[in-house]
Image: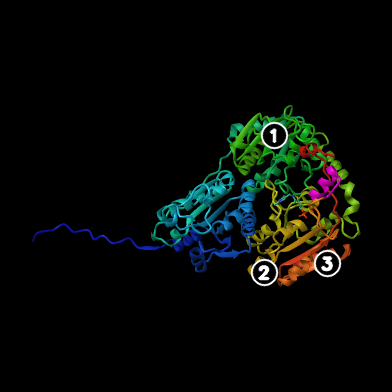
Amino acid sequence: MTAFPQREIRRAPETRISSYLLVEYLERLGVEVIFGLCGHTNIAVLDALSKSRIRFITSRHEQISAHSADGYARVSGRPGVVLSHLGPGLTNAATGVANAALDSIPMVVIAGDIPSHYYGRHPHQEFNLHQDADQSQIYRPFCKRVYRVDRAGDLPRVMERAFHLATSGRPGPVLVDVPMDLFSADLPVDAFHQVPAEIAPPALDPATAERIVQMLADAHRPLIYAGGGVLSARGSQELAALAEALEVPVAHSLMGKGCLHEEHPLLLGMTGFWGTPIANEKCRTADVILAIGTRLAEASSSSWDPRFTFAAPPTRLIHVDADLAEIGRNLPTELGVVADAKLALAALAGAARGRAHRDRGRIREEIRRGRRAFAEEWAHQWTSDQFPLRPERILNELRKAVPEDGFVVTDVGWNKNGVAQQFSITVPGTFITPSGLATMGFGAAAVLGVKVAAPTRAAVALVGDGGFGANPNVVATAMEAGLNVVWVIMDNAAFGTIAGLENMHYGTTFGCVFERNGKPYRVDFAAMARAWGAHGVMVESAADLGPALREALASDRPAVVQVPMENAPTPTPGYWNINDIYRKGD
Ligand SMILES: Cc1ncc(C[n+]2csc(CCOP(=O)(O)OP(=O)(O)O)c2C)c(N)n1
């Protein structure tokens, strides 16, 4: 019998619709929640999500989705994922994504775009004034990478790259822009086979660790300056071990708040414009500073003016950061190291253990006295009974009501500056704030993602009435998603921080206060919360606040506690160059 070669029978590979494969891939990557808002370009993904174990949290504004994803990422340590519609959906989300970018928060934004076959025909909701299907360009200045997917077959590879880039090195947002028809295309069932590689973060080599430890040990007035990178790397224990081994005081940036227990005897506090005098003074007079996980940003560095916070030189600066581009940018740097903050601190603490160091005199006593002297300036305000309340009284009641491991999420305004300066944070990572972009509207929305990431812990947003008013429909999202967060609104009937600044320089608060017929105009946000089915209380005396907070924290619903407050400025022991710029005309 003649043996004929077997003819290969070619079958079409088994395929499925891409959006279902995409969602299964996200499940495999460990995505547990997606924040977003619907549109005709992304409902294919929504249908796939409806069949998956990934939770979808819808909001009433894409900025809320992006801030919530940001809050979720900060607490969970996983990338936040946002699903957006094209055009106005993506532009609405932009502020939240940009805020995440400037605070180095890992995020993947998946956006629908116009159908690919309408390219060049200017279809509905497309940005095309300079180029067809151009929406992804809007995200270029603040994304680590912007991907536009042109073929369905590219989607798996692009998704893998997006998660890889968002989470590795210096984390940040990545946009994946997908023509809507590609969500309904057929793909081989195994198309999404590649997952991001596990990355071993860069460590500090032993010789450099030895050199840095020796510089710190020999220094007369050494100092460690900790930034948000220490917290995102979960490096607080290693930081404490290094500081204690060499008896080196620790100051921190805004993002570094909480890097050490507030009562740690070597903790100086925050630097810069809204910092503390002792932290600014010790930084300015240090002979060696080890800055780690920080970009030495303007506000925390008193606009880099050597008279206030950092004077390098003569200070010799060592700078350890995940991002090479940050090193040497703002201050002359003697030694730069690209390393993960936790690994670097572990190596340094190991090298420092048992090491002889120069006598630090009475550094702990100096810190204690310096911190106490500044705190005494406002001590009487912490118990003030005045109504509308003093902001310090609000902080006092909040600190007593929120468990130590509860989260305090701020916005911008008195809330951010006051908490960073005066509020005790004892558990690392429980202070969440928008630093780089300082976005009004962040706090009220980010708290939702914080609660999703840590559902059993208290989550409180401390926000101004201006900031809360930017997007009050966060309450609706919290109600629908069953997120029992608390918003504490410091209500001074103004964009108070800017009103104070304008008044200081121009003698007016024009355009910065809320008025109707010449009188302060207050929105009853507590009533609004009740209208949405949430718990809402308007505080009517200083004595009301403590019980109101406890009731809100114990509530089985989201809660708004609105607190009428005096518009008083936060103390500014540092410097900000803007104050030298304003000129008043005739
Ligand atoms: C989106 C956005 N717009 C404008 C600003 C400028 N800004 C900084 S603080 C502030 C006032 C915030 O007012 P409020 O939330 O009431 O807090 P307060 O200053 O009264 O404590 C404004 C408008 C900003 N940071 N973000």
Q: Vertical placement of 331 versus 131: above or below?
A: above
Q: Residues within 10 Å of mark 1 (few under 14, many from 20)?
A: few
Point out the frontmost of discs 2 and 3. 2
Which residue is found at the position 74% from the left and 27% from the top? 314
| Span highlighted in magenta in the image | 497-509
Q: Is residue 94 left or right of residue 395?
A: left
At 65% from the left and 35% from the top, the residue drawn is 319
- For label 1, the SS is loop
The residue under label 2 is 479
Q: Which amino acid type corresponds to the residue marked 2 in the rendered image?
A: Met
- What residue does disc 3 label? 547
Label 3 close to label 1 by CB (< 8 Å): no
Q: Is residue 582 above or below residue 486?
A: above
Residue assigned mark 1: 355
Q: Is residue 136 above or below residue 327?
A: below
In the picture, which quadrant includes the N terminus?
Answer: bottom left
In this view, the residue in front, 84 or 352, is 84
Q: Magenta: predominant secondary structure element?
A: helix
Mark 3 residue type: Pro
The alpha-carbon separation of the residues under discs 1 and 2 comes to 55 Å
For marks 2 and 3, give the CA distance: 23 Å
Disc 3: CA contacts within 10 A as few (<14), some (14-19) or many (>=20) = few
Q: Identify the coloring.
A: rainbow
| Spot occupied by residue 457 in the image (x, y as percentages of width and height) | 69, 62
The residues bearing labels 3 and 1 have C-alpha atoms spaced at a distance of 50 Å
Is 257 or 353 nearer to us in this picture?
257
